[in-house]
Image (cartoon, rainbow, N blue to C red):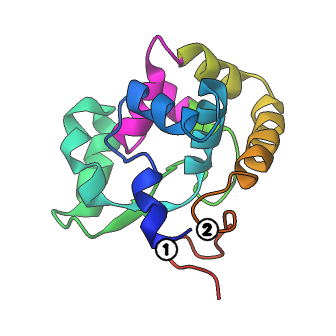
């Protein structure tokens, strides 16, 4: 929530080991990391953070994104092309189908985390229960400031 703490967040180009280390540093498990990554089922992202991955994505999805980005790295696109305005488990199916934007999302389809991704994609209600618990745990993490802030607008600190 605070500019001086953004360096503690994993970046969009992170690999599994970097993600796990980043989450572990905050007292979160690998399963909680996979669970919290599901928040990428909503929101938008600038093309500059994933355009280098077009060749690694599902070809039809990549073509659609290329057209939307149209060579402009500052263009914003939905992170979840299927249910962009719904907080749901669709993200995990997108990971399995290679239809995610960030490297940090795509790497969750690795041998290290695929079982968790598949479980979240397949079991109705499972991800939602885990997400609620992981969000509650994350909300108790104290940074340099007096706790975290859930932003009403993700790119701006609340008033």
Pick whichever of labels 2 and 1 is earlier in the sequence.
Answer: 2
Q: Count of labels shown?
A: 2
Residue at image coords 81%, 44%? 132
Q: Is residue 4 positioned above or below 107 on the image?
A: below
Highlighted range, magenta: 93-113
Instruction: Single out the mark in the foreground, 2 or 1.
Output: 2
Residue 27 percent across, percent down from the top left: 64, 36
Residue at image coords 66%, 63%? 148
Residue at mark 1: 155
Residue 79 percent across, percent down from the top left: 47, 53
Quarter of image, res 70: bottom left
Residue 20 falls inside the magenta stretch: no
Label 2, label 1: how far apart the Cα atoms are: 18 Å
Residue at image coords 50%, 24%? 96
Residue furthest to the front in view is 144
Residue 105 percent across, percent down from the top left: 44, 37
Q: Is residue 95 positioned above or below 87 on the image?
A: above
Q: Is residue 98 visible in this depiction of the protein?
A: no
Placement of the C terminus among the 4 image quadrants: bottom right
Front residue of 108/90: it is 108
Tell me whether the residue at label 2 lies in contact with that at label 1, contact meaning CB atoms closer than 8 angstroms: no
Judged left or right of residue 132, residue 141 is left
On residue 94, the disc is none
Front residue of 132/142: it is 142
Residue 94 falls inside the magenta stretch: yes
Q: Is residue 55 visible in this depiction of the protein?
A: yes
Residue at mark 2: 145
Residue furthest to the left in view is 71
Placement of the N terminus among the 4 image quadrants: bottom right
């Amino acid at each position: 929530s605070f500019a001086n703490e953004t360096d503690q967040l994993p970046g969009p180009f992170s690999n599994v080991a970097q993600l796990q280390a980043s989450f572990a540093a905050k007292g979160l498990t690998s399963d909680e990391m996979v669970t919290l990554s599901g928040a990428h089922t909503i929101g938008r992202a600038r093309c500059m953070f994933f355009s280098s991955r077009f060749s690694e994505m599902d070809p039809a999805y990549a073509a659609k994104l290329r057209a939307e980005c149209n060579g402009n790295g500052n263009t914003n696109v939905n992170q979840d092309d299927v249910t962009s305005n719904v907080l749901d488990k669709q993200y995990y199916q997108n990971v399995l189908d290679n239809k995610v934007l960030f490297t940090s999302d795509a790497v969750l389809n690795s041998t290290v985390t695929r079982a968790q991704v598949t479980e979240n994609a397949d079991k109705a209600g499972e991800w939602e229960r885990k997400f609620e618990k992981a969000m509650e745990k994350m909300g108790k993490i104290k940074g340099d400031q007096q706790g975290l802030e859930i932003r009403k607008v993700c790119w701006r600190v609340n008033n």
